[in-house]
Amino acid sequence: MRLGLATMAAWLAATPAYAAGWQVDPAHSRLTVEFEQTGKPVAARFESFAAEIAFDPKDLAKASVVVTVDLGSLRTGDGQRDQMAVSSELLAAVSGPTAHYATRKFAARGGDRYEVEADLTLKGVTRPLMHPATISISGGEARAQGEVVLARTDFGVGSNQFPRGDQIGLAVTVRFDLIARRQG
């Protein structure tokens, strides 16, 4: 669930080899997830995440994004649901309070489009993933957008109490829309 958010956050903090780093603008950036609960869509947002980003579209071999997401900052708009989401059965925000996303490779797909290979670590489980991203830079501002669909049980989220997906859907869509400003 945190991967998409982590990826976006990390990209926004990128520091190109020859240029200043990027600072994510939290007031204008979003890291969200969507899943189903009893067949109805639920939208949630992570309110706290940090990123280290090095990104230069002319030197993708040196590009990297590392995002750390505070799992306890998940907000769905329902206090009871939020409390359940961060419980040990689901996100385990007390025993493993963060998710970690780190890119391995960026591949240009034309224009501002990229294919991203990364690793996501959640609840002590690390899995590789691939997802598209749109990354645009205009002057001193950068914007990264994209989404990735994760199978929550691949990371042990709800595997014991909610393994079938009838109460909590198996697929989680992570979306990121990050704005960053060049530092220095």
Image (tube, rainbow, N blue to C red):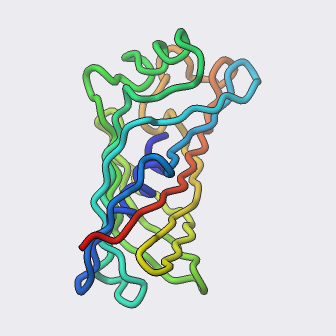
Task: Please give left or right for residue 176 compared with residue 13 in the image.
Answer: right
Q: How many marks?
A: 0
Q: Residue at x 37, y 17 (%)?
A: 88
Decide if residue 69 is on the left or right side of residue 78.
left
Residue lying farthest to the top in this orientation: 80
128 vs 47: above or below:
below
**Res 37 quadrant in image:** top right
Q: Is residue 1 above or below residue 59?
A: above
Along the viewing direction, whichever of 182 and 4 lies nearer the viewer: 182
Q: Residue at x 47, y 39 (%)?
A: 154
In the rendered image, which quarter contains the C terminus?
Answer: bottom left
Rendered location of residue 77, percent (x, y): 59, 21
User: x, y (%) of residue 131?
Assistant: 54, 62
Residue 70 x, y percent position in the rendering: 34, 35
Foreground of the two, 154 or 142: 142
Vertical comparison of 33 with 91: above or below: below
Residue at position x 72%, y 29% in the image:
41
Quadrant of the image occupied by residue 169 = top right
Residue 72 location (% of width, % of height): 37, 26
Question: What residue is rendered at 36% in x and 56% in y?
Answer: 119
Which residue lies most toward the right here?
A: 39
